[in-house]
Image (spheres, grey):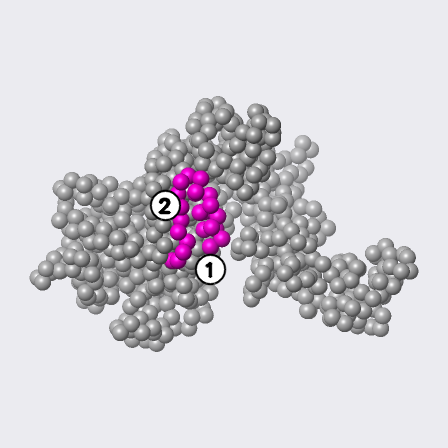
Amino acid sequence: MSKKKHHSKNKRTTIGKYSGNIIEFLLQHPGKSMNYKQIASGLKITNSNQRDLLIKDLTALAAAEKIQEKERGKFSLNLDKHQLVGTIDITQSGTAYVEVDGMDEDIQIPKNKRKNALQGDLVQIFVYPNTKKGQRTEGEVTAVLKRFKKLFTGIFEKQTSGKYGFVVTDRRAIPVDFYIPKEKFNKAEDGQKVIVELRDWPDDADHPFGEIVEILGDPESTDAEMNSILVEYNLPLDFPEEVKREAEELDVEIKEEEIKNRRDMRSVTTFTIDPKDAKDFDDALSFRTLENGNFEVGVHIADVTHYVKPGTLLDQEAYQRGNSIYLVDRTIPMLPEKLSNLACSLRPDEDKYTFSAIFEMDKNAKVLNQWFGRTAIRSNRRFTYEEAQEVIETGAGDFKDEIIALNDLAKILRKKRMDDGAITFDKVEVKFELDENLNPIGTYFKMMKDSNHLIEEFMLLCNRKVSEFVSLTRDGKITENTFVYRVHDDPDMDKLQDLRLFIRQFGYNLDLSNHKTITRSMNQLLADVKGKPEENLIETLSVRTMSKAKYSTENSVGHYGLAFRYYSHFTSPIRRYPDMMAHRLLQHYLDGKKSQNPAPLEEKCVHCSLTEKQATDAERDSVKFMQVKYMEQFVGDEFYGYITGVQEYGIFVEIPETRCEGLVRLRGISEDTFYFDQKNYSIVGRRTGITYQLGDKVMVKVAKADLRNKQLDFELLG
């Protein structure tokens, strides 16, 4: 849920002077009916004029059905009218917001009205009445109906008496520490990182009661922190035994009788191109020249749904996970290794079952014919991106003719996408070299080159064509077929306006006249900043103007960033559950069956969009931790950096060599007392007028590497 859209400092206002006080007082006694004298006493109203106002407000609230008069002269809350259920989201400030299905606006919960709710819990809330139109609706948590999670991580702090301790939680969205009685220590020692299970939280207790269920170890060790991140995001550490057992019992032998039911493409030149550290290869390309001079390009995707059937434990586990998770030092796969790394991995010189899109294309990359269905392939070679890139650059090596021809077609496809209004974000990814203890010993950048774009374009082509095939008839009319789309709404115009104002100080501009001019000028901007000091900053700010992509059975907006009207995820079923959904739906329609009910599929789309966000946040946290750990060795060293963020409490500076970002606190800058100029993204010295703003190049010293909070502190040198 979007906070910026909903947050407001406006407080609720009520019909009469005491209306709000009456509601709050009755909320503290939800099962009781009270007369005006009891309510006046509770509100400490003693003067007769105030009592008259109180009686007026009671009458008005009862008339508006905000409260009810069950007995003559006795009032109680009209709970049924004002009780709602939703999911709570607690911000770092302590204020919370409850998202209620069917409501456009989230309900704001003040810090002292959260009861004992924790991040993500399903809660029952009482919504305060009488808010004026246009002002924030507020409420109060009355009950926690379901805990989002019961396992948390933190540092165990044993009290000196040894009779009890506290687990100080890692995340700011969990604003309390867990009370641990001595009998629940379970051998944990002071200062260790642990997993604590929530056992109870009585209404009259300041802290939840917990039990330490696992010791992760040294809080600064990589292994402890990565496991901690998984627990904090409610992500799995391992597969349940029964799921492993079901995977082991699968028959994964390739059988000739099954191949007879498929299009046999084992004799066609086929290869994979993947990152050098990849363990699963879920897509392959085949290529041959036809007698008519056209090209046949096959996009072959691991046939995961041949093995993973609906209703099985494997399918249920894959759905719950939603996707694979890629932390810096490990992969948490969506499917057990027997499937992800063996049966469904398109390894060279092994027959494999695949689900394929076969395209006949001319030399201008126009698709003349297409075919979709189940196939069998045999990969001839596994390329890394670096190896394929070398073939492209030198024109020599295995399958050079096929790779160069595919690269030429991919460039045409890419140019057409750009001309149609696609936006390309080739952001540089930071990667780490790790030693045997998983400690970072070096960094390098993952760059997008022609070999990456080659694979990207044919995967995009496959995803788009599958989506169009299901959604449109041959003459271009829209079908009624339910499908799972990857949708991406238009960018936020207010954010685009802010970006345009900001980049002008660097000499750049955006033309926001219409869709075409926005995408064209955005691509030009991203091209112009390449290699410039402000590149990463402007790319980051540009990404923030974009909406978030999600999964949905509704395709009203298409995919803005790719400039595709129809787009689905089909090409990575080993690591994304929506791709498995798309495979099953495509086969359903290939078999000539009627459209499926969208409701259960939409529910799965919402779930998978959520698990994707959780995975992304966890992956980002793992990178932050590794960056801070890597920079520990440079505490006291000086670096040039660029200001990438400005807040009222400090400025963020990024070091280009490592892409590590640190905070310079305003109170720590000695040359002057600075204030925050929000309009100009800058801080300004009150005495000297010295200004530091976004994009400025500065010299900093690494002052502190705080692994616990995944934060670097810098000292500004000038």
Q: Position of residue 437 (x, y in %)?
A: 40, 33
Up the image or down, 531 lies above or below 619; here it is: above
Residue 435: x, y in percent?
Answer: 37, 32
- Residue 333 part of the magenta segment: no
Near-viewer residue (713 or 34)? 713
Residue type, mark 2 in image: Leu
- Residue 565 at least partly seen: yes
Locate residue 259: give its quadrant: bottom left
Dot label at residue 182:
none
Q: Could you tell me the amino acid type at mark 1?
A: His
Q: Which residues are magenta?
A: 492-515
Residue at position x 66%, y 54% in the image: 10
Q: Is residue 493 magenta?
A: yes
- Residue at (73%, 67%) from the top-left corner? 66
Disc 1 versus disc 2: distance between alpha carbons? 35 Å
Q: Main secondary structure of the magenta part?
A: helix
Residue where numbered disc 1 is placed = 607
Q: Nearer the viewer, residue 140 or 539?
A: 539
